[in-house]
Image (tube, rainbow, N blue to C red):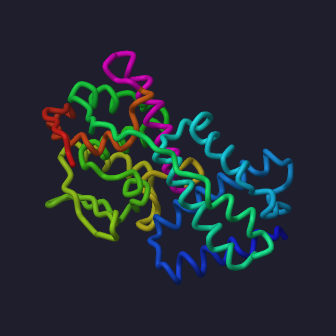
Amino acid sequence: MSPIAPTLQAFFTERLTKQRQASPRTVASYRDSLKLLLGFAQSRTGKAATRLDWADLDADLVAAFLDHLEHDRRNSPRTRNLRLTAIRSLFAFAALRHPEHAEVIQRVLAVPAKRFDMQLITFLTAAEIDALVAAPDTGRWEGRRDRALLLLAAQTGLRVSELTGLDCHDVVFGGGASVRCFGKGRKHRAVPLTTTTQAVLRVWLAERGGRGDQPVFPTRSGRRLSTDAVERLVRLHATTAARTCPTIHPAELHPHVLRHSCVICTGKGRVSYVSSAA
C-alpha cells in the first residue's frame, strides 16, 4: 500500500466529511483534483500510484502538474487555482500526520496561486446560442445528450456542478415544470423550464431511461459527467458552431458563459431573447 493512501482516505472521511462537513460537490471537486495529480505523478515518476510516497509529490512535481493543467488540458488560471486549493488542503492535513516530510510539505504549501486579470462578463447572442445548441450530431447518442445539456444550460443558467449533479427525478414536467438543483452555498432551488426545453428533455429522458436517482447527463458507462468533460464538450461543439457562426470563439467559450446567457425560447425551438445574467 502507498504511504499516501491512509492519509488520503482520512482526508476525505475525517477532514472533509466530518470536520469541515464539505458539500458533496466540494468533495467531488477535491477528489477529481487529487486523481489528476496522482495520475500525473504516476506518469512523471514511472511509479504505480500504489507505490507513490510524499517525497514523490514535491513542489517541483506540483508546479509541473499545474503547468500541465494550463498548457496540456487548457484549464483556465481559475481552474488551476482551484486544483491547487485541493492540493494545499490535503498537504496541510498531511503535515500533522507526517512530520518526517515537513520540508516537502511546506514547499508544496508555498506554491503560489496564479494571478490573473478579471475579465468582463461575456454572454452569447441569440444567433450564437442557436448555433451552439444545433452543433451536436443528433444522429449519435452523445449528440442528443449534449444538445439537451446545452439547451438546459442556456435556458436556466445552471452552474456546471448543478448540471452534472442533476438526477432524473430532479426534472419535473407538466404544470409548473422545473428543474430542481442543490447549488452553491448548499441552497436548494427550482428553475422554471420553457416549453421548448421541456420537449427536448422529455425526449432525452425517455431515451436515457434512467432511474430517478441516476444522473440526467451520464457517460456511455452510466457514470456522472465530470466538470472537465462538460468543458470539453462545450469547446468541441463551439468549434463546430463557429463554422456557421464566426463570432463564436471556441478558445474563449467555457460553460460559465452559458450561465451569463439567459434565454427565452419560442415554441419552434428558436431563441428569441438574450440578456446578461449575474
Going 42% across and 27% down the picture, which residue do you hit?
250
The residue nearer to you, when weighing 267 against 246, is 246
Residue 190 x/y as whole percent: 23, 63
Q: Can residue 243 be seen in this view?
A: yes
Query: Depth check: 223 or 123 in front?
Result: 123
Residue at 25% over, 65% down:
189
Report x, y in % for residue 72.
Answer: 62, 35
Q: In which quarter of the image is residue 135?
A: top left
* Relative horizontal placement of residue 125, taking residue 186 as reference (left or right): left
Q: In this view, does 65 lie above or below 32?
A: above
Q: In which quarter of the image is residue 43?
A: top right
Position in image of residue 51 (x %, y %): 85, 62
Residue 19 on the magenta segment: no
User: Which quadrant would residue 272 be assigned to in this image?
Assistant: top left
Task: Specify the quadrant that holds the N terminus.
Answer: bottom right
Look at the image and give the residue range highlighted in magenta: 223-249
* Res. 141 in view: no
